[in-house]
Image (spheres, grey):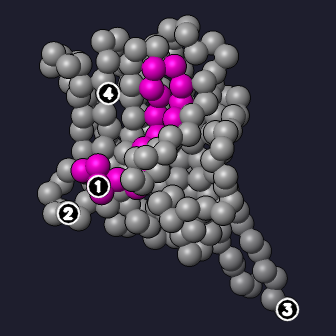
Amino acid sequence: MRIISVLLLAATTCGALTVDIPPLDTERPADGEASVDVAIAPKVHEHLREVRIELTLHATVSNNVQIAFGLDTLPADGALAAEETAFILGWDSGAWFLRPAGLRERFEFAPADAETSRTRTLRFSMLVDARGAPITLTYAEDGGSFVLPSLAIPPFPPWLRPDAWNMLRVTSRGRDLATEDIDVRFLPDLTIIILR
């Protein structure tokens, strides 16, 4: 007799691939902007189940921290250009925002206390199916979930497919230092089927 045991292991316990993001320069140029480009290893797309982004910063009405995801191809020079960007997620002068490819649209959510300067944490989670297509998308600030008004999902747009990203770019700007801390994880499907 065969007994099929399906063990669902929490993806956070092992197998997660974290993108190592070096800290931005604390000494900023006159325009207050600093950025860093980081490659996303191809292996993160293998058996991918969830993309999890956590952004913590000292948020004010005059600073901006954003994470851009995309495909470095025009040419592949280790830097993510605007025309290579799939989407941008982050904080901008009092609101969490998302800008899709083309950068013509902007979807945002302003917390009730948006004008209060304080440490805030954004948690972004996207589950994908076996083909790499998104199936759920959630946002939360400090544990409380929110939605981006007028961003109609589903259906999921092609720019939200993780298998089309090989680079991310973190940018911080503004006169108020954000002291940002960013964690980007690609979590694999750790479903194990044991036949006995």
Could you tell me which secondary element the residue under label 1 belongs to?
Answer: helix
The residue wearing badge 3 is 1
Tell me the amino acid under the disc marked 2. Answer: Leu
Decide which of tag 1 and tag 2 comes sooner along the chain: 2
The residue that appears at 31% across and 33% down in the rendered structure is 171
Give the residue drawn at x 38%, y 19%. 63
- Marker count (numbered): 4
Q: Mark 4 touching mark 3, by CB under 8 A?
A: no
Residue at the extreme top: 116
Question: Residue type at mark 4?
Answer: Ser
Indicate which disc residue 172 carries.
4
Q: Residues within 10 Å of mark 3 (few under 14, many from 20)?
A: few
Q: Position of residue 116 (x, y in %)?
A: 55, 8
User: Is residue 133 depicted above or below 80 in this figure?
Assistant: below
Q: Residue furthest bottom?
A: 1
Say which of marks 4 and 3 sits in front. Answer: 4
For marks 4 and 1, the one nearer the N-term is 1
The type of residue carrying mark 1 is Glu
